[in-house]
Image (cartoon, grey):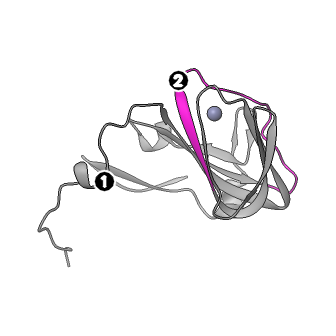
């Protein structure tokens, strides 16, 4: 992970390509990198997963108060939530409530995905309600 730029209001990191992400090890997770501390996130945890072919999360789990959204960017696999198994592929989006007992695994081509974790019921405004438009232009 390389720091690209940072300022009072931002931090930019380079995780490398998908092949490099598959080499990250965080605790029991092979091929997963967590961004909360690295990018100093204050409202959510985001992890990027790059599972090798036929890899799996090391356990099933639920959460105490956080909802998760999984977004598959590349490859395919499957997920199981509360005993129900279903396929994942590029473009799949899955929201899981805190109590959902979940795990996921990749298929023959591996699977690259994002997992965004945020406190359930915490979002009070978004997009047009929260965005503030500006007349600022690109610097040359
Ligand atoms: Zn989780």
Q: Residue at x 78, y 49 (%)?
A: 86
Locate residue 3: give its quadrant. bottom left
| Residue furthest bottom as drawn | 140
Relative image position of residue 87 (x, y in whole percent): 78, 54
Q: Which residues are magenta?
A: 52-71
Instruction: Return the residue found at the far front.
Output: 84
Q: Secondary structure at mark 2?
A: loop
Give the dominant element type of the magenta stretch: helix, strand or loop: loop
In the image: residue 132, left or right of residue 108: left
Q: Residue furthest left?
A: 135
Residue 138, above or below 72? below
Residue 102 vertical position relative to residue 52 in the rendered view, above or below: above
Q: Distance between the Cα atoms at labels 1 and 2?
A: 23 Å
Residue at the image point whose x is 11% and y is 68% from the top: 135
Can you identify the residue that label 1 sits on? 127
**Is the CB atom of the residue marked by disc 1 within 8 angstroms of ligand 1's nearest atom?**
no
Quarter of the image for residue 100 reads top right
Tag of residue 65: 2
Query: For residue 55, which numbered disc appears in the image?
Result: none
Q: Earlier in the sequence, mark 1 or mark 2?
A: 2
Badge 1: few (under 14), some or many (20 or more) residues near its Cα, within 10 Å? few
């Amino acid at each position: 992970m390389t720091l690209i730029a940072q300022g009072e209001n931002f931090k930019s990191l380079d995780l490398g390509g998908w092949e490099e992400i598959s080499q990250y090890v965080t605790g029991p997770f092979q091929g997963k990198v967590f961004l909360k501390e690295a990018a100093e996130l204050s409202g959510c945890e985001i992890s990027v997963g790059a599972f090798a072919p036929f890899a799996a999360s090391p356990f099933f789990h639920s959460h105490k108060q956080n909802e998760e959204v999984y977004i598959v960017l590349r490859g395919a696999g499957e997920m199981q939530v509360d005993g129900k198994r279903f396929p994942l592929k590029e473009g799949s989006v899955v929201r899981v409530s805190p109590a959902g007992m979940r795990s996921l695994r990749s298929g023959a081509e591996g699977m690259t995905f994002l997992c965004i974790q945020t406190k359930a019921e915490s979002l009070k405004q978004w997009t047009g309600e929260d965005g503030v438009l500006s007349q600022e232009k690109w610097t040359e």
